[in-house]
């Protein structure tokens, strides 16, 4: 009975639903700008600049409705004392048009983000091709890839904990049965 309860409790704890990101916790929202301009021609490259006076370790750039196209970059301190990340995106296509925003967060707690920056509308004119989000040599990670690995790792850790509890319970049961048998033989 106890063994079954422990197994069910551990299994339930490892599989409970998780909220991957809490946005809007930090009130100092970053700013977002784009170079060379908001209206670009298909084939052009653009640079998104996410910046803040707050000392965020990392910034994330998201195109609304397409989190799979998110980009993550570590922040750099500027000579003006701001913290910023530059996201090099291109070549732009008509499918790249949309609304973008950025968030800041700290490495110590990557699941807790700032409020979003003000939205930035980008319009691309010209023929449609697939968007390539990382021409930058620093090769930013995709946010969805990081998130998926985090959930996978949490599941693995929960299952590993479950296996350890099961093995510990079996070891204890074996030890208890052996000592019970020893005491019975001594009577």
Image (tube, rainbow, N blue to C red):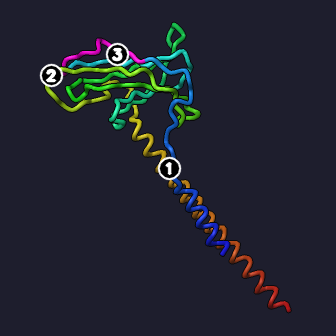
Q: Secondary structure at mark 1?
A: helix
Q: Secondary structure at mark 3?
A: strand
The numbered dot on residue 34 is 3
**Of discs 1 and 3, which sits in the foreground?**
3
Taking the spot 77% from the left edge, 83% from the top edge, the residue there is: 180
Asked whether the residues under the numbered discs 1 and 2 touch, taking CB atoms below 8 Å apart as contact, a structural biologist would say no
First reached walking from the N terminus: tag 1 or tag 3: 3
- Near-viewer residue (177 or 121): 121
Which residue in the protein does label 1 denote? 153
Q: Is residue 159 magenta?
A: no
Locate residue 88 relative to residue 105 in the image: left or right: left
Which residue appears at 35% of the width and 31% of the height?
Answer: 64
Kindly identify which residue carries mark 2: 126
Residue 38 part of the magenta segment = yes
Q: Secondary structure at mark 2?
A: loop
Magenta part of the chain: 32-42
Q: How many marks?
A: 3
């Amino acid at each position: 009975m106890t063994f079954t309860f422990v197994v069910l409790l551990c299994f339930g704890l490892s599989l409970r639903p998780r909220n991957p990101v809490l946005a809007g916790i930090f009130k100092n929202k970053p700013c977002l700008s784009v170079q060379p301009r908001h209206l670009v021609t298909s084939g052009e490259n653009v640079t998104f600049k996410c910046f803040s006076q707050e000392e965020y370790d990392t910034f994330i750039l998201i195109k609304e409705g397409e989190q799979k196209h998110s980009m993550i970059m570590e922040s750099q301190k500027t000579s003006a004392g701001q913290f910023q990340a530059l996201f090099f995106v291109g070549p732009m296509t008509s499918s790249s048009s949309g609304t973008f925003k950025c968030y800041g967060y700290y490495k110590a707690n990557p699941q807790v983000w700032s409020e979003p920056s003000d939205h930035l509308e980008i319009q691309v004119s010209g023929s449609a091709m697939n968007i390539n989000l990382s021409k930058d040599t620093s090769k930013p990670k995709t946010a969805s890839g990081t998130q998926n690995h985090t959930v996978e790792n949490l599941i693995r850790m929960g299952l590993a904990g479950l296996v350890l509890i099961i093995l510990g319970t079996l070891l204890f049961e074996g030890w208890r049965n052996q000592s019970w048998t020893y005491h019975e033989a001594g009577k």
